[in-house]
Each structure stands twice: as C-alpha cells, then as structure tokens.
Image (cartoon, rainbow, N blue to C red):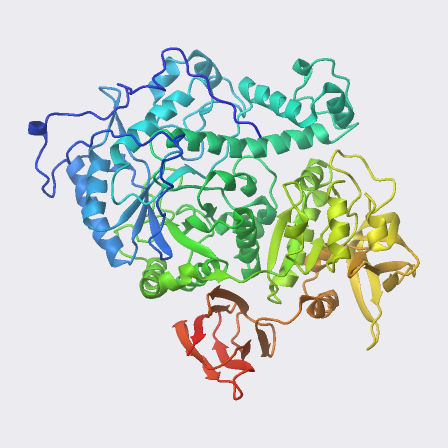
Amino acid sequence: MTNWPHRARPGSTACRPTTRLAPRLGPPSSRAPPNRRSRPAERPCRMHPNPSDPSAPPPRPWHDGSILLGTVYNVFHSEYATDEEFFARVDTDLAAIRAANIRHLLVFPLSQWDHATRRLKWERTDYLVRKIEEAGLKFVPLLLKEEQCGHYFPPWQFETLPEIRQQHHVPGPNRNNREHVDFIHPEVFPLLEDYFRAVIGRYGRSPALAFYNIWNEPHYSHQSPHVVARFGDWLQKKYGTLAELNRAWGDDFTAWEQVTPFLADDWDSSMPSIDWGLFRNELNGVILGELRAMLHRYDRSRAINANPVGTPWSNFGDFGGYNTDNWQFTAHEEFAGLSYYPDALDRPHREQPFPLWWHNLTFAVTRSAAGPKPYILTELYTNGKSGLTLGGWLDRATVWQLAWTALANDCKGLFYWKWQPFARGRQALGRGLTTMDGTLAPRGEAVRELGAVLAQWGDTLMAARLETRPVGVLLDMNGLLKCLEQNPQRGLRHFLYQSNAGLFRALDEDNHGVDFLRTDRPLDLAQLRAYRVLFLPFQIVLRRSLAPLLREYVAAGGCLVADCMTASLDELDFAYATQPGAGLDEVFGARRLDWVAEEKSHRVIWSRESGPTHFTAAVYREILQPAPGAEVLATFADTGTPAAVRHRHGLGQTLLLGFALGGTLHTDPGSPLRSLLHGWLRPLLGPAAFTWAGAGAPPMIRRHERGRDQVFYLINPAATTVEGTLSVPVTGAVTVETLVGPKACSVQPADGTSSLRLHVRLEPAGVLVLLLHPA
C-alpha cells in the first residue's frame, strides 16, 4: 500500500524547531541542584542522524537478553496538587516497583499543559525519568495512545483549525472529540510531529530509554474526505482501470471521482464492502509506517513497537475500532506487540474466564502475524476494568498461569496495565497490581514471584524459541469480510470464526503446533512446504493464484485438508462454476455439486478397519461427487452420499469433507470426530519431539529449543490434578533442571539412545517449566 506524504499546513513548524512545544531552556545558573525533591535540569534537544543516511547504525537492542517484565506507569497528574506531592509518589512507587522485581516502565502521559502559557511543561516527567535512571530501571515512552489527543492537541487548538472545529461540532461516528481527533488530517499531523520532536529531543538520549511504544492500541476510525481520497488512490493502484473496478464492483462508474465507499450497494457484488474493509485494515499499517518515518527524523537508534488489541480471529468481532488486522503492523516495527484484555471478552460470555486453548489461539495468531520477529504483551490486564465492573477480577493463580501460558507461546515480554489502580474517571478503582494504598495485591505478588524466576532464568527463556510447527492453517481476509458482510445472517458472520477456532482447539489440546498463514498476503511454495499438513477451514474464498501452489504442494508430498464451502468464490467475489474451484477439484478428486445448510446436525458414518464411527456434523451437508480413483472414507447416514473423500495426487494426498470440520468441533468439542482427526494426523506428522502418556486429557505442552538445550512448559488447564509421563527422545545422558513448579521424577535412558521419561504431577492450574541439556 502506498505511503501518502502529509502536506504541512501553512505556517507549520513541521520541518523546523518549534517554539510552541520546544523544551524551555534556561541558563545553568537558573537550574536547581539535583537533590531528592528538586525539579531536574532542563534537557537540551538533540536530534539524531538523518534516517535516509545509509551509514546510520541499526536500532540498538530493545532488550538486555532477558524476558522483559514491566508495568504501565500511568499516573493521572491532576491527582497531585503540587509537584512535590507527585515527586513523593514517584519515590515511593519506584522503590516498590524494584522490590516487585519489575525492571521496565511504560510511561504515559509524558507531559502536561501549562494553561497560562499554552506550552508543555515537563517538570514531573523530568523527575520521573531521572529517578528511573538512578534506580537502574528502564522506561518506554508511549508516544501516541489510540486516537487520543490530549497530550499533543489541547482544547484551544480547536479554535485555530476551522475544518477540525467544524467536525468537532458535527454529531455522529466521524466526530472529533477529546479522544478522537483526526490525527492524520493534514492540519493536525504537524502538531503530532511537534510533540514527537519535543519528547524525543528531551528524552531520546536517556540511557534508561529501552524502546518507543510509538502507537499504543493502534486503530484509526475516521471517514474524513482525505481518507476517502486515499481510498480512491488505493483502488486505482489495485484495479488499474475503471473498467476493471466496474467489473469487480458490478457498477457503472464513468469517472474515478464518482467512486465512494458509502453507496451500500452489495446486490451485484460484495467487493465494495470488502475493498473498504481491506483498505481500512491496510490504512492502519500505513499510518504506523508514517509515524515511524516521522520518529526516524529525530531518532532511529531505538526500536519501535506497536500493540493492537487482541485479534478478531479469536474474539469473533467485526473489523473496525479496536479490532484491527495484526499482520498490517509487522513491517513497521522491530518486534510485535499486543494489548491483551481477555476480561473484555469474558463479559459477553457470561463472565466465564476464557479457557486455556482460547488464550493459545490469540497468542498463535499474534505469533503468526509477527512472522520471524518476536512479540511481547505491551499491555496485559491486571484486574477488572473498573471497580464497578462485574467481572475480570484476577486471583494470584490466574495471573501466574496466564503469564507462563504467554511465555510458553513464545512471548518475550510482559507489561502489566497498570501499577496502581485508576483513582478516577470511567475506570475508577479498576486495574492495578497494587491496592489503592500502594500495597501489592495478590495478583501483584504473583508478578513479583514471576520476576524472581526471570531474574535467574530470563536469559535462557529469551534465547529459547518455540519449536517448528508441523501444521498450517490457511486463512483469507476476503473470505472473512465476505462473511461479516452478511448482515441478516448473524450465525454466518461467526461461522468462519467458529470453524477456525474449533479446528485450532482440537489441534491445540492434542499439542499439535499450529501456524496461521494468510493467503491474501505474499505466499510462496517454500513457505507451504514447511508444513506437513495444511488446512483450509471454511475458506469460501480461494484465490486463483493460490491454486497452482497448492497443487504443487500436494504433488511434492504435502497433505491438504478442506471442508465445506471451501474454494466457492474467487478473490473478486465471482463464484467458481466447478467447485472446489480454480482446478482444485482435480487435486481433491471430487466435486461439490450442491449443499444443504440448516440449523441442525447431520449424522456421519466414518468407516474404519476396527468398525464404523458415528458422529454428528454441524450445519452443512454437501453433495460430493468423487472422481475415479478417489476413496470415500465417510458417508451421511440419511442420504448415503459421500461425507469425506481422500485422494492421492502425486506424492501427497488430500481430504475433502462435505461438512464443517472446525464448526463441528466447536459445537461439540468431545465429538468422536476429534479422535478420528488425531488418528489420521499422527502418521502424517512423523516422529514426535515428545509424547505424553496418562489418564485423561494431557496438559498443555510447549517445547522450545536453544541449541542442544530444550525447555518444556507444561500447564494444567483442568480443575483436577493431571498425572502422567512425558517421554523425550534423547541421545546420551541429560540433565533436567526444574525452573518452575514441582520437581519431575526422571528416568534416564539405559542404552543412551532411547527416551528420557519424566513422571509429572500437576495440581489444578499448575505450571511446570523444565530445562533439559546434555550432561
């Protein structure tokens, strides 16, 4: 997507030092001595090398080689009547933060306004930063929060910008307000740059600065004229000619100026809605790129991080507002981030805490979106949203388990929102690792214990990375937006989510590693061949360009699994005449002739050597026509027609299901289909890096690698004790160290080439972390 440069407004100071927001410098004689309560000396504004200079050094490391453990230091400055009162609070808090084994602070806001002079004042933040430096801690400046503007756009700015003032008084979703100023508007963006310049000029050389949180919880919601103009540019780049746009949109435009996202016309094509959704998702990434370029004009020596809120892939939400496309941000940051507030998702689900597999789903999506880059939880919740929220309360055990669940899923840092509870406003009495009087709450005590472990083992856990995953799940954003567009069909709007979540749960709870691959983003054969098995769960959209890659993947020995309605439409919303489309009927050895979709179950009979297995499939029953040479594995009981068709293609094989695989597993997690799936997968996935033997469901197990060392995370999601044996193939003697949890009883291999066996007993919500390295 093209980066559109912003136009500086007339008289803007965007390209030169400003007098409006610049640090107020004074002669040395005017500076107070740096005693405990003094206001610290002013910091000179020093800029960094031009980012376009190829000789400029790369960003310095954003970590010190260990897992990051931090908290958000978000103090409402109006709570403190005097600076001295604020300074005393800082002294008390920093001592307590160090005692809690926390070493990083995410600081917001970074300044306050002087109403008399209409200038930024820095006394409190200067004091905070100096005390952070003296305490040997690190801080992360939070530069832009969501769409909030108070730190760079004070109320009197509404008086000076006529268009913004006009929007400020217009009711509706596009209104400018105190938390929602259109910050990429050409009249406003220079003011944001002024603020970036002032903050970086003041604190950019601090030895305690770890990295920049450049855009916290990034999302942009405006539909201003300049955004619609960007959309027009985006469409011209995508389609090239008006004729191609008309073909895709089913419309009759005669000039590009006529094109608008607000026609609400989907009778001929869903592409107007889909393109608007794709554009708005991409725009968030473009804006982050523009913010990064702005920051790099003043400092390119520090890493950059942004943190979207969760992911619609696991919270089942519409795109828009906080729900953004995580993949859009990765290219513009050194490491990925996430704001994780599962309590926000608990509330619509009758206050039932999210199960462990659902946390794993969110982290798997985040990790997949980050690609080879690491990710952190830039914000992790600490308690209910407010003292009046009926839910979200966190006990010590939950904080402990959730932290280790994130680390087991390759997360490399945790920043808890926030240190103290909110003392006022819409979230009064909510959040916080401490109680209102500053004492560590039980949840804070869990974080202190976590910090003690990381102080000893954080470097080992940082260096170890999650093992290669053998299973890939293919997802297309167009298909998701197509489902979300079906407004009257609320059930369908969630069916793709449920198909994805149900499949993930079945794989995750059997400890099969899963990656998500986006087929609407660049994808090549080498990436596909990294996986032994690929799934297409209810992927109604399949791109014509993807079909040849899938054909080659299977021919070379891969296994491809698809279920109902997969490959029904192409990427421009045209239905395939033969389905699965784009020639994949030849690869699957079957065609979809028709289907029935009803709010009911359909009984399926799966043939096995040991006898047939019966289960009920959710919603869909397709009519499949197998090709000669294809093998029918299952039939629908009421019609006798094929429900599952296996086909050999080259060196590989395919499995086409005439029902919803993930949808069925989501509806009935204990379905016999789950054991059938696992039995079918095991020989395809090859030798396992570990096995578990025990009564009942296994614990969650993650294996990380660091050279010849192995780190195992075992977490019990059940309300009962789990007991069993973890077997790990090894060569030679192995030393087993318990980093967290009860000591595991190990049995070394007698011949030096067999499996190390570890007897494990985990209490409910128990956590065990083991380090295995050659003796």
Residue 352 in view in this figure: no
Q: Residue at x 43, y 15 (%)?
A: 165
Q: Is residue 429 something one can see in this rendering?
A: yes
Q: Quadrant of residue 412?
A: bottom left
Q: Residue at x 47, y 17 (%)?
A: 169
Q: Nearer the viewer, residue 94 or 769?
A: 769
Q: Is residue 178 above or below residue 378?
A: above
x%, y% of residue 162? 43, 11
Q: Position of residue 388 (x, y in %)?
A: 42, 46
Residue 396 location, x and y as percent? Answer: 39, 62
Q: Check the image and name the residue furthest to the front.
A: 55
On-image quarter of the N terminus: top right
The answer to which quarter of the image holds residue 518 is top right
649 sits left or right of 712 in the view? right
- Residue 477 located left or right of residue 49: right
Task: Tell me: residue 505, above or below residue 212.
Answer: below
Residue ranking furthest to the left: 29
Q: Quadrant of the C terminus?
A: bottom left
Q: Which residue is pictured at 9% across the width and 34% down the height?
A: 32
**Residue 335 horizontal side relative to residue 510, left or right:** left
Is residue 695 shown left or right of residue 452?
right
Query: In the depicted view, which residue is nearer to us: 733 or 359?
Result: 733
Q: In the figure, residue 635 lies in which quadrant? A: bottom right
- Residue 727 in the image, given as x and y percentages of width and height: 55, 78
